[in-house]
Image (cartoon, rainbow, N blue to C red):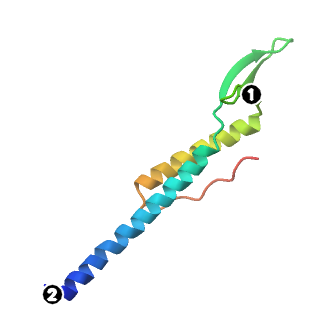
Amino acid sequence: MTTRRWMIAVVVVAVPLAWGTNRHLSFLKLAMAHEARIVGVSAVFATTTNGDRIHVWFDSKNVEISYEQVKRDDWHRAMAAKYRSAAHRPWLPVPPDPPEPE
């Protein structure tokens, strides 16, 4: 095998490896960005004066948050898991993101 062929072989191997590494890192960045937006929700049941049971959600600082924020947290958790999984298999296609809840 000549030097020229060895150089071609190295390029043929290096280009896909560089592409996979770049894609891996970009998926990890996306996962971390979604994880940073998670508030950290805990739920409790509360009973109203007429006896109805309701959910009340709190963030990590024990501040009450809305149901919409809970839905956004769930969406960010799902997106973080999706991109963490994609980072471990960067050669596979990634489906588009569902819309963020409002």
Q: Where residue 87 sits: x, y (%)?
A: 45, 54
Please report the residue visible at 40 percent of the width from the left and 65 percent of the height from the top.
20
From the viewer's perspective, tell me whether residue 2 is left or right of residue 38: left
Q: State the separation of the CA atoms marked 1 and 2.
A: 69 Å
Which x, y percent locates residue 69?
A: 73, 38
Compared across the picture, whether 30 is left or right of 59 comes to: left
Residue 2: assigned label: 2
Circle 2 packing at 10 Å, graded few (<14), some (14-19), many (20+), is few
The amino acid at mark 1 is Val
Residue 28 on image: x %, y %: 49, 53
Screen quadrant of the N terminus: bottom left
Give the residue pinned by disc 1: 63
State which quadrant residue 97 falls in: bottom right
Ranked by sequence position, the earlier of labels 1 and 2 is: 2
Residue 38 image-quadrant placement = top right
Vertical arrangement, residue 45 with respect to residue 41, above or below:
above
**Residue for point 67% across, 24% down:** 43
Please report contact status of discs 1 and 2: CB closer than 8 Å, yes or no: no
Is 43 or 40 nearer to us in this picture? 40
Where disc 2 sits, the SS reads loop
Q: Residue at x 71, y 27 (%)?
A: 58
| x then y, percent, for residue 61 | 69, 28
Above or below 22: residue 60: above
Q: Residue at x 29, y 73 (%)?
A: 13
**Amino acid bearing label 2:** Thr
